Image (spheres, helix red, strand yellow):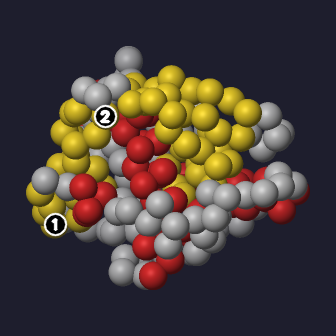
Amino acid sequence: MAIMEIVKHPSDVLRQKAEPVRKVNAAIRRILDDMAETMYEAHGVGLAGNQVGIARRLVVIDVGDGLLKLINPEIVRRSGEIVEDTEGCLSIPGWQGEVPRDKAVQMRATLPNGRTAWFDAEDLFARAIQHEIDHLDGVLFLDRASSVYEVTPADAAAGEESQETEADGAQTAASTPGES
């Protein structure tokens, strides 16, 4: 496995709509492994293919319940209950925003073994899914945010402490849920 370079805003690849993966093979599984290693190294909870310069519909997510490697993920149902919370992004360091998202979603995706899986997600998991699928569609949290503000390294560290405290039980929307 290898650490990949995270593409930073305003790179054009972040605005590209990612192409579907047509065949799950060893190369795709290797990319997902590298994306996961990169996400963990950067202390994120999600990472989309666009963010490492690969315009393919690939996502890795880990909100504390274990790593998910997703191919061609799509949201098939939204709760309609909108919750606004703070998000950041590994491709937009130093900035966060208040972003309205559905509290719960249902997602379908292909797994690295080629099987289709369905996920019912709430709170932080639902927020991370929506954030990463937005990346695959060329949409950034900045496009959806009701407000955006610069954060210092000290602010970010305080947010991580808050996220760890809130994540110790049920999954909840934490202070920096969409970092990816």
Check disc 1 and give the amino acid type.
Answer: Glu
Q: Residue furthest top?
A: 169
Count of numbered badges drawn on the protein: 2
Please tell me whether mark 2 or mark 1 is closer to you in this view. Answer: 2
**Which image quadrant is residue 111 in?**
top right
Check disc 2 and give the amino acid type.
Answer: Asp
Residue located at (17% from left, 49% from top): 98
In the rendering, at what x and y percent does residue 21 appear? 73, 58
**Which image quadrant is residue 113 in?**
top right
Residue located at (23% from left, 33% from top): 82
Asked whether residue 36 is in view, the answer is no
5 on left or right of 20 = left
Q: Which mark is residue 66?
A: none
Asked whether residue 142 is in view, the answer is yes
Q: Which mark is residue 150?
A: 1
Residue located at (51% from left, 59% from top): 136
Label 1 environment density (alpha carbons within 10 Å; few <14, some 14–19, many ≥20):
few
Q: Which residue is mark 2?
A: 102
Q: Residue furthest right?
A: 26
Is 32 in front, or is 20? Answer: 20
**Marked residue nearer the N-terminal end (2 or 1):** 2
